Image (cartoon, rainbow, N blue to C red):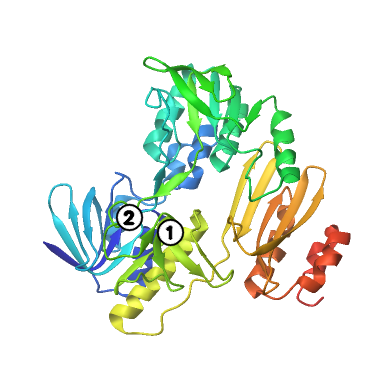
């Protein structure tokens, strides 16, 4: 059995950032990353750019194999078949076992299953990993019509890819409007109006109920009774945390992910979780939730690495995770940004500042009065002041009326000196 000081499960941005942070702070400790995907770190947020044809595959690659060796980090490509948190031991598909003095769980997410008749037909892609996206790009050369299932980030960027490549696209969105219920009908209508202006039809409150085709999809049937011809389906139906291996263990786990505190520690001593799988106590919003985006995963990986070193070397205090998450998706006519906590069910009053083809939706905590999140359409210029306002966690309830009356003065109104 291999024994290491730091055992990291998952080689994505959270796991890799944690390993590199550990190496900067602990030059002697042994580090092993176990990664199921046969690739060193690459940019998953740029996979849709590969689909759009705006980047080459080499531009996605963020690390080379030799860079791990240079930092004395072992990157092991293998499937994990068992995790024992109490002994911090994992079993691999070849029956090898690896034990860590400290462990980080950064297993990320997987695409939500597409469970419809014909859902395994050729020509269906989720664009969530490099191999799948590479296959989708290769198949585009013989594609005239595409159905995009889902109205989230992947759906919007897939729409841009089809517009760029002059391929006819139809979108199926299960909800009554885009990003329901995180934004309201007014905001959702703005986005759908923009998408429709590019001759991309959208069927809301609809979904694929059957895929028809032998070797490759030829058309789909929908809940509303539509029959749509296509040679490719792109899925944007969301993801699920990779929790199967830890669900029935001593770790506290639910459908959201692995439960951790504000320092990203699990309920089992010496084990942390970071990235999309971490259901964490958010100090800034006062809620517990997951955040599935790149900047959050990188920030959590760094913090987990710092806290693991502090624990092993008994050096310094452990730190709380205090990063304001941010994610922006762009498509023709759309620059949509999510900042901070905009998750479903948060204890907030919603403030909508809207104009033609643009809006700002603010999430203000009902009890504390501080801004915890924001959604913006075509307003990237105010991201900085909103980020600052969330970070400072000051009560802004006395500024709400002024924001509603003169939304163009948002930056001035929310300035700390105002």
Q: For this view, does 412 lie left or right of residue 273?
A: right
From this view, report whether residue 368 is shown above or below residue 19. below
List x then y, in percent, for residue 160. 61, 33
Q: For this view, does 244 lie left or right of residue 146?
A: left
**Mark 1–mark 2 distance (CA, rounded to whole Å):** 10 Å
- Where, by quadrant of the figure, is residue 225 drawn? top right
Q: For this view, does 30 lie left or right of residue 306?
A: left
- Where, by quadrant of the figure, is residue 263 drawn? bottom left
Which residue does the numbered mark 1 point to in the structure image? 275
Viewport quadrant of the N terminus: bottom left
From this view, report whether residue 416 is shown above or below residue 171. below
Which label sits on residue 336? none
- Where, by quadrant of the figure, is residue 123 drawn? top left
At x 55% / y 19%, what residue is drawn? Answer: 145
Front residue of 152 and 9: 152
List x then y, in percent, for residue 372. 64, 66
How many other residues sit within 10 Å of disc 2, few (<14), some (14-19) or many (≥20)?
A: many
At x 69% / y 41%, what residue is drawn? Answer: 334
List x then y, in percent, for residue 385. 71, 65
Front residue of 116 and 394: 116
Q: Judging from the image, what secondary structure is the residue with disc 1 in? A: helix
Total numbered labels: 2
Q: Judging from the image, what secondary structure is the residue with disc 2 in? A: loop
- Residue most toward the right? 405
The reply to whether the C-beta atoms of the residues labelled 1 and 2 are less than 8 Å apart is yes
Viewport quadrant of the C terminus: bottom right
Which residue does the numbered mark 2 point to in the structure image? 10
From this view, report whether residue 405 is shown above or below residue 151. below
At x 29% / y 81%, what residue is drawn? Answer: 313
Q: For this view, does 244 lie left or right of residue 231?
A: left
List x then y, in percent, for residue 290. 48, 59
């Amino acid at each position: 059995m291999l024994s290491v000081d730091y055992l990291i499960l998952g080689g994505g941005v959270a796991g890799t950032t944690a390993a590199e942070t550990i190496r900067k702070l602990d030059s002697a400790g042994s580090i092993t990353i176990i990664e199921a995907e046969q690739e060193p770190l690459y940019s998953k947020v740029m996979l849709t750019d590969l689909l759009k044809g705006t980047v080459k595959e080499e531009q996605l690659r963020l690390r080379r194999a030799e860079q791990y060796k240079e930092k004395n980090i072992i990157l092991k490509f293998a499937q994990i078949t068992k995790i024992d948190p109490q002994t911090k031991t994992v079993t691999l598909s070849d029956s090898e076992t690896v034990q860590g003095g400290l462990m980080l769980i950064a297993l990320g997410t997987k695409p939500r299953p597409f469970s419809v008749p014909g859902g395994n037909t050729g020509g269906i892609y989720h664009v969530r990993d490099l191999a799948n996206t590479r296959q989708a790009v290769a198949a585009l050369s013989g594609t005239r019509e595409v159905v995009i299932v889902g109205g989230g980030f992947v759906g919007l960027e897939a729409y841009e890819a089809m517009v760029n490549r002059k391929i006819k696209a139809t979108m199926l969105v299960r909800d009554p409007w885009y990003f329901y219920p995180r934004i309201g009908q007014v905001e959702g209508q703005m986005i759908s109006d923009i998408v429709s202006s590019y001759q991309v039809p959208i069927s809301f409150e609809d979904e694929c109920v059957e895929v028809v085709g032998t070797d490759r999809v030829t058309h789909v049937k929908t809940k509303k009774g539509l029959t749509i011809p296509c040679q490719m389906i792109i899925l944007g139906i969301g993801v699920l945390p990779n929790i199967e291996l830890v669900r029935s263990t001593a770790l506290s786990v639910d459908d959201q992910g692995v439960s951790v505190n504000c320092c990203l520690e699990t309920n089992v001593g010496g084990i942390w979780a970071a990235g999309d799988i971490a259901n964490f106590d958010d100090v800034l919003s006062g809620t517990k939730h997951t955040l599935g985006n790149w900047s959050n995963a990188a920030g959590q990986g760094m913090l987990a690495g710092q806290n693991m070193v502090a624990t092993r070397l008994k050096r310094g205090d452990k730190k709380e995770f205090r990063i304001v998450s941010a994610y922006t998706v762009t498509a023709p006519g759309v620059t949509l940004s999510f900042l901070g906590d905009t998750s479903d069910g948060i204890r907030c009053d919603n403030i909508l500042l809207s104009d033609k083809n643009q809006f700002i939706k603010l999430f203000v905590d009902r009890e504390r009065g501080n801004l915890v999140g924001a959604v913006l359409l075509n307003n990237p210029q105010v991201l900085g002041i909103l980020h600052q306002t969330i970070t400072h966690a000051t009560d802004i309830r006395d500024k709400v009326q002024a924001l509603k009356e003169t939304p163009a003065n948002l930056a001035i109104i929310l300035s700390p000196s105002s």
